[in-house]
Image: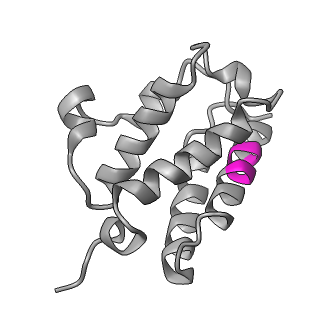
Amino acid sequence: MASSLFERAGGLPFFTSLVDRFYERVRDDPILRPLYPEQDLGPAARRLTLFLVQYWGGPGTYSEERGHPRLRMRHHPFAIGAQERDRWLTHMGAALDASGAEPAVAEELRRYFAMAAEAMRNQTR
């Protein structure tokens, strides 16, 4: 039986570390930081971690706490154009590069992140 990407990546510790590295970069980014209204990025990091864990085959805590992900609806209040998408991908790519993920796992995550980041765009600029 094939294991989930969640298991192949290393479970919750992998995703927690990945997201923490991502938000370390977002914290000082003049393009992305304004998209996070909370002063403390901890709650946003927790939500992203739980979402990724669930999406990739881990526990369903995200849906238990927040309901259906509805990503486009949740991101709609924020102006997300090509520049924001590209910065998000740059920071997530750097976090993934530093993660030590096996190449097959990293490639699958990169494909998903590219698709999801484009899907969140709601500005044509």
Q: Nearer the viewer, residue 28 or 35?
A: 28
- The reply, left or right, for residue 122 in relation to residue 28 is left
Residue 90 place in picture, x, y as percent: 75, 52
Q: Residue at x 65, y 52 (%)?
A: 92
Q: Residue lying furthest bottom in this view?
A: 1
The answer to which of 100 and 70 lies nearer the viewer is 100
Q: Which colour scheme appears in the figure?
A: one colour
Above or below 122: residue 16:
below
Residue 35 against residue 2 in the figure, above or below? above
Is residue 10 covered in magenta? no
Quarter of the image for the C terminus: give it: top right
The residue at 50%/72% (across/down) is 108
- Residue 122: image x %, image y %? 62, 32
* Residue depicted at 40% across the width and 50% down the height: 52
Span of residues in magenta: 86-91
Relative placement, left or right, of 12 versus 65 is right
Q: Give the main secondary structure, helix, strand or loop, of the magenta stretch.
A: helix
Quarter of the view holding residue 97: bottom right
